[in-house]
Image (cartoon, grey):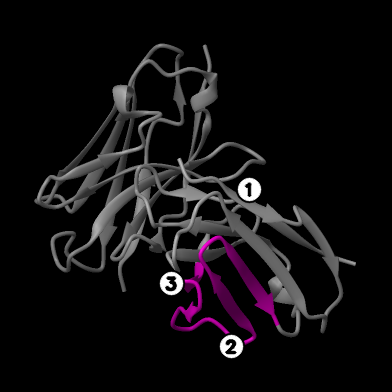
Amino acid sequence: QVQLQESGPGLVKPSQTLSLTCTVSGGSISSGNYHWNWIRQPAGKGLEWIGRIHTSGTTTYNPSLKSRLTISVDTSKNQFSLKLSSVTAADTAVYYCARDYAWYFDCWGQGTLLTVSS
Amino acid sequence: DIQMTQSPSTLSASVGDRVTITCRASQSISTWLAWYQQKPGKAPKLLIYKASSLESGVPSRFSGSGSGTEFTLTISSLQPDDFATYYCQQYYSFSPFTFGGGTKVEIK
């Protein structure tokens, strides 16, 4: 059974770059025709899809974040990562990684809280 | 972006009640719609995909219907474990994928 686990710094200063990693266990990140996604949720609010990557390296980004966003994959470590530059308080949220096979999300990590504050 | 609007935003119900949540899309999305359940402090859990297909392991009291721009999630007999927030998500367009604002099901 595949499991996903997010990891990150917890706190980032404004204008810096946020970096998060999702580690996939219980199966190879390269097996199956999956895409690997990032989704975030500000406290008390709804869900926002950030972007996704296939192990071929193909990425799709939310246009609202595209100019600040990089998603990458490291198949040797069974991980994929998110980098979001020039962060502000509006980027404070719980960040989830999730798997999709057919564009809906069938497997999620537990989430990691990222706070942007000086 | 395709806008997804859920109603109501909050719903008060009792155990055993039949509950219906509505999700409307700003344009036709065929049946490219999923439903998720989220409990406080937890990640969302997939319930329904392709508007009406039940995810493996999800109780049969959950059902989904609709196509085009209007969709419903129905819980046939509300159980204590069902008090949670429910989200719809369209995947007709991945530029970007979008979610509804959520419906919180509370104990009456």
Q: Are marks 2 and 1 on the same chain?
A: yes
- In percent of width and height, residue B70 lies at 60, 64
- In percent of width and height, residue A116 lies at 50, 21
Which residue position holds label 1?
B101
> Where is A102 relative to A17, above or below?
below
At mark 3, the secondary structure is: loop
Amino acid on which the number 3 mark rests in the picture: Lys
Which residue position holds label 2?
B60
Chain identifier of the residue bearing label 3 in the image: B
User: Which of disc 3 and disc 2 is earlier in sequence?
Assistant: 3
> Where is A71 relative to B59, above or below?
above
Span colored in magenta: B46-75
User: Which of disc 1 and disc 2 is earlier in sequence?
Assistant: 2
Distance from the alpha carbon under mark 2 to that under mark 3: 16 Å
At mark 1, the secondary structure is: loop
Which residue position holds label 3?
B50
Front tag of 2 and 3: 3
Amino acid on which the number 2 mark rests in the picture: Ser
Mark sitting on residue A35: none
- In percent of width and height, residue A113 lies at 50, 38
